[in-house]
Amino acid sequence: MRTITAHDLKTQFNIAIVISRFNEAITHKLYEGAILRLKELEFAEDQITVVWVPGAIEIPITAQSLATTNTYEAIVCLGAVIRGETNHYEYVCQQVSYGCQKVALKNSIPIIFGVLTTDNEEQALARVGGNHGHKGRDAIDAAFEMASVLRQID
């Protein structure tokens, strides 16, 4: 029986991060955590591409453009959608989530969904180094794990 699980990669790979500027107080912390984790994993700066976009809705099309270059082994999508007083929140969360999944399936590349969807800013801050960990770091770990798993399948 063959079992595939993630293991340490002996070589790093090209990775892209797509990150929303909207709610920048939160997204910049996601960015900092992701970059710190990549450095801990010994990624070279020339293996990392960071693309800042205006808001979460722009994340999937940017991920799609990056995926079609066949340059990256994983794309990490980071953002923060915080509930407001209208149902705009539900539409944004649904579209961004669906868009990222569609890009992953269409291009057979890990598109890591690191977009926070919280009720308030306090919950978001708890997920960027607070008592709920650091989702920017977690997204990089997920990308690293998925690259390892998919390399073994190919």
Image: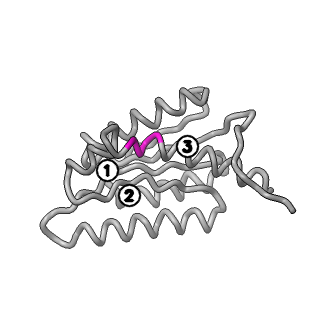
| x 21%, y 62%: residue | 83
Residue at 34% x, 56% y is 56
From the viewer's side, name the closer residue of 24 and 33: 33
Image quarter (top left, top right, bottom left or bottom right) of the C terminus:
bottom right
Type of amino acid under label 2: Glu
Q: Is residue 12 above or below residue 5?
A: above
Q: Choose between 53 and 31: the one closer to the eye.
A: 31
The circle drawn on residue 141 is: 3
Residue bearing the label numbered 1: 54
Indicate left or right for 52 with 25 as reference.
Answer: right
- Residue 14 screen position, x and y as percent: 63, 39
Going from N to C along the chain, the mark reached first, 1 or 3, is 1
Task: Report which quarter residue 10 is drawn in.
Answer: top right
Residue 91, horizontal then vertical, whole percent: 30, 72
Position of residue 66 relative to residue 108, above or below, is above
Q: Are marks 1 and 2 in contact (CB under 8 Å)?
A: yes
Asked whether 7 falls inside the magenta stretch, the response is no
* Residue drawn at 38 percent across, 69 percent down: 95
The x and y percentages for residue 54 are 31, 50
Quadrant holding the N terminus: bottom right
Q: Amino acid at mark 1?
A: Pro
Q: For the residue labelled by badge 1, is the local secondary structure a helix, a strand or a loop?
A: loop
Where is residue 120, by image quadrant? bottom left
Which of the 4 image quadrants contains residue 28?
A: top left
Q: How many badges with numbers are in the image?
A: 3
Q: CA distance from mark 1 to mark 2?
A: 7 Å
Q: Give the side of residue 119 with respect to residue 43, left or right.
A: left
Read off the residue under disc 2. Answer: 58
Segment colored magenta: 133-137
